[in-house]
Image (tube, grey):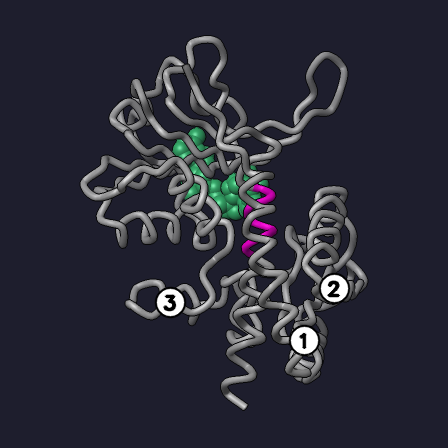
Amino acid sequence: MTRIIDGKALALRIEAEVAREAAALDSMGAAPVLASVQAGRTPAAEIYMRHQARAAERTGIAYRRIELPAEISERQLLRELERIAQDPQVTGLLLQTPLPPHLSARAVRRALDPLKDVEGVHPANLGWLLSDRPGLVPCTAAAALECILSTGVDLRGKEAVVVGHSETVGKPIALLLMERLATVSVCHHATVNLQEHVRRAEILVVAAGQPGLVRGADLREGAIVVDVGINEIERDGKRVVVGDVDAGTENRAAWITPVPGGVGPVTVALLLRNTVRAAARQVQAG
Ligand code: NAD
């Protein structure tokens, strides 16, 4: 029987710890403040921000929403981000994605202040993942790892397969699994015979943004499956959110994350954990 990895329950446990750390910082006069910047509005970003704002409220972290016009030029956006990052009250900053098509997410990520980059997507934070002293760890990748570890598995020597090789999700997940001594394969859109790789996976993380990419019958018996994908599709005339894994009745996994309610809430909780960590480091740095 397949067991569900309950992301909401896991997120609440992380949030309780974050709330204690936020209160401790507050009592030192160093309350964390998270600025959430958006360029234009998308329905998906509205949903993410609602979840972020509620989780911030639960943990006692101030959440400032900064709306910029969708037509903003890259230069203006970079200037705005610099201005916000220089505000000494703002201890963490995140930029909602997707960005309007004329803006380059890579260029904008490079311009973030790595000390306030709570999503862990600045090249410096990604680079620190290769060392034994990680900085602000990319939160979706860290959330996938938390979901896996919550099953109690020891990753040492396990056959792990990551589907998706983006800079901010797939690659950092692969590094985190490798750090725990799993044997990691990374698949992407040019991978030949994806199913063969999936069938080998004791640990499978799918982050491709392709609904139904992996089916229950493709899974290895007893696998731990983390579905990072968030896709909106039409089903029976309704818009619904699904992941990349369509496990169905032939599901062979021992554990699986649901979508919604799996990796998503844990990602938000870890965004807030990064927010308190960033604030604490800024206090230490004076
Ligand atoms: P991306 O578009 O940057 O990367 C997609 C990756 O999937 C690429 O590496 C691509 O090569 C691979 N891919 C695409 N089609 C494939 C195929 N047919 N076979 C194998 N590989 C294929 O996306 P991303 O930013 O890495 O996000 C991936 C998914 O995760 C999206 O659905 C996104 O919405 C979701 N996401 C979820 C969270 C969360 O908190 N749960 C956070 C970030 C992203």
Q: Is residue 30 left or right of residue 190?
A: right
The quadrant where residue 186 appears: top left
First in sequence, mark 2 or 1: give its number: 1
Q: Name the residue beneath numbered marker 1.
A: 26
Q: Which mark is residue 134?
A: 3
Quarter of the image with the C terminus in it: bottom right
Residue at 53% in and 35% down: 229
Q: Is residue 62 left or right of residue 221?
A: right
Closer to us: mark 2 or mark 1? 1
Q: CA distance from mark 1 to mark 3?
A: 25 Å
- Please determine whether, in this image, residue 163 is positioned above or below residue 16: above
Q: Which residues are magenta?
A: 264-270
Magenta stretch encompasses residue 225:
no
Q: Position of residue 85 (x, y in %)?
A: 65, 78
Magenta stretch: helix, strand or loop mostly: helix
Q: Name the residue beneath numbered marker 2.
A: 63
Q: CA distance from mark 2 to mark 1?
A: 14 Å
Which element type, helix, strand or loop, lies under badge 1?
helix
Magenta stretch encompasses residue 266:
yes
**What amino acid is labelled 3 in the image?**
Pro
